[in-house]
Amino acid sequence: MEEIIKNKLTLKQGEVLKLIDHRMKGSLQETDVYNYDIVDESGLKVGSVEYTHHTAIKGFKVTQTMTQKTLDGEIVNNERW
């Protein structure tokens, strides 16, 4: 999963993703929500990422979204595909 969103993120040299949480939601558990911390070289959290993968119940169309934020909550990157 990380490889899918790494190409869309704005990461600085040495920053990596650390999976914090995964949950499923929806009446048929059709939405996966992944939460990541962005950690710098010294191990300090510098931001966060939420990635969702939704499969529509009717038609099975897949929608993915990714929101990257700073520690202050400022949105750095927000994409949907």
Image (cartoon, rainbow, N blue to C red):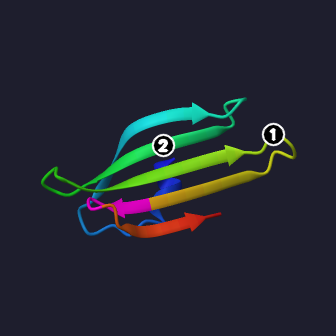
Which amino acid type is shown beneath numbered disc 2? Answer: Tyr
Residue at 67% x, 34% y is 26
Image x and y of residue 21, in percent: 41, 36
Q: Residue at x 71, y 30 (%)?
A: 27
Where does residue 29 sit, x and y in percent of width and height?
Answer: 66, 31
Residue 57 magenta = no
Q: Residue furthest right?
A: 59
Q: CA distance from mark 2 to mark 1?
A: 20 Å
Residue 7 or 46: which is nearer the viewer?
46
| Magenta-tinted stretch | 68-72
Which secondary structure, mark 1?
A: loop
Residue 44 bears which disc, if any?
Answer: none
Mark 1 sits on what residue? 57
- Evaluate if marks 2 and 1 touch, with contact meaning CB atoms under 8 Å apart: no
| Residue indicated by mark 2 | 34
Left or right for 42, reference 56: left
